[in-house]
Image (cartoon, rainbow, N blue to C red):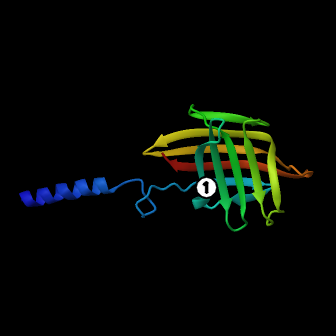
Amino acid sequence: MNKLIYSGMVAAIFSITACNNDNNNDGNPDTNGTFHAVIDGSAWDADADAVGFVVADYGSGLTIAITGTKAADTAHFFFTFPYFTASDTVITEPSSDTDLRFQDNGTLGGGLWLEETGTLDVTRTTQDGIETLTGTFSGTFVDPFDSTSVKTVTGGTFTAKRLI
């Protein structure tokens, strides 16, 4: 009887400690993200494994860079803005401290568009060694070489993660 109780306790402890936040089965925490936008009325979604962010110092202080890429059409969003220490921040464009852009190599018309007007709202959380940025964005993106080439971006959302 004692062996049965002992075996049950060992099994219970093992099952509790074996559970973790790893849902990609390779031993690494899941850092996949989401990145969605509606561009000129058409939905666009990045590949989950191609969404992320890094923190870097290019000489003027810490900067956050977020990317969301869709391999099928080689298009991507790329946002950079100053690192913030609060739990959230709202950036209203235009801002000299940010660079929000959408680029594509042909499928959606080809080119580069920089955000001219709009808003980026970002919330930061940290749990179990993963920093997560969740945000919304919208705005008017304009080709810097042709002001008549405009992309209207609405309903933008993202979740980007990094190991800390």
Residue 44 falls left or right of residue 15: right
Quadrant in which the N terminus appears:
bottom left
Residue 6, position in %: x, y?
12, 56
Front residue (pair 58, 43) = 58
For image coordinates 64% across by 34% down, the residue present is 89
For image coordinates 80% across by 48% down, the residue present is 114
For image coordinates 77% across by 60% down, the residue present is 104
Residue 123, position in %: x, y?
59, 39
Q: Quadrant of residue 135?
A: top right
- Residue 17 against residue 99 in the figure, above or below: below
Residue 132, position in %: x, y?
54, 45
Front residue (pair 112, 91) = 112
Residue 12, position in %: x, y?
23, 55
Residue bearing mark 1: 51
Res 141 seen here: yes
- Residue 152 against residue 74 in the figure, above or below: above
For image coordinates 37% across by 54% down, the residue present is 20
Residue projecting furthest to the left:
1
Q: How dense is the environment of label 1, judged by Cα within 10 Å: few (below 14), some, or many (20 and up)? A: many
Q: Quadrant of residue 90?
A: top right
Residue projecting furthest to the top:
86
Residue 23 falls left or right of residue 69: left
Q: Amino acid at mark 1?
A: Val
Res 40 seen here: no
